[in-house]
Amino acid sequence: MRKLGFLSIVVVLLAAVSLASCSDGAVFQQSKILPEAGWHKDSAVTFEYEAADTAGVYDIVVDIRNNGSYKYQNFWLFISSTSPDGLVYSDSLECVLADFRGKWIGKGSGSLYHLPVSFMSQVKFPKQGVYKFNLIQGMREDCLLGINDIGIRVLKSEN
């Protein structure tokens, strides 16, 4: 019993240290797990970022985790962001997940692969308040299988 308790504490501490070391300047980071049955083309994944700093410069990264059963080399996203005053910016983003030979590009562990993809760089949030990001899968399939989760990170820009 005592040994199991100690082991649990060690695992929790290692996880906490690991998460702290992976922060990479993120002021916001959130991921959402997608249904095992697939990501339907009409289902938006929404993230809300509360911007307080209107002077800072930021980079926005989309984090994608796919499993080895994903059957395509690339992945298209339709992204719209809405500012606190209702202005909408929309764009599409192609995420190349595998090279021309089919080898996954992202970092992997088991059958899961993580790939960060730059969406916007050198961005300022001109107004304080909530910025909403809506992500919709832009592939030709009604229900896309193999994408495990999707996330957004807002990072303090290094430049």
Image (cartoon, rainbow, N blue to C red):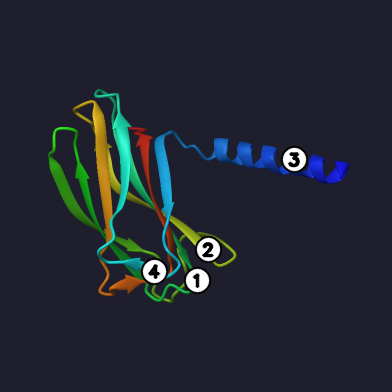
Q: Mark 4 touching mark 2, by CB under 8 A?
A: no
The crowding category of the residue bearing disc 4, from other C-alpha atoms within 10 Å (few below 14, some 14 to 19, many at least 20), is: some
Q: Which mark is residue 10?
A: 3
Q: Is residue 5 above or below residue 104?
A: above
Residue drawn at point x = 26 percent, y = 33 percent: 130
Q: Position of residue 113 (x, y in %)?
A: 50, 61
Residue type of the residue flagged with mark 3 = Val
Mark pair 3, 4: CA separation: 35 Å
The crowding category of the residue bearing disc 1, from other C-alpha atoms within 10 Å (few below 14, some 14 to 19, many at least 20), is: some
The crowding category of the residue bearing disc 3, from other C-alpha atoms within 10 Å (few below 14, some 14 to 19, many at least 20), is: few
Quadrant (top left/top right/bottom left/bottom right) for the N terminus: top right
Q: SS at mark 1?
A: loop
Q: Which residue is mark 4?
A: 38
Which residue in the rendered view is the most extreme toward the right? 2
Mark pair 4, 1: CA separation: 14 Å
The earlier-in-sequence mark between 4 and 2 is: 4
Q: Mark 1 touching mark 2, by CB under 8 A?
A: yes
Q: Position of residue 44 (x, y in %)?
A: 28, 56
Q: Which residue is mark 1?
A: 68
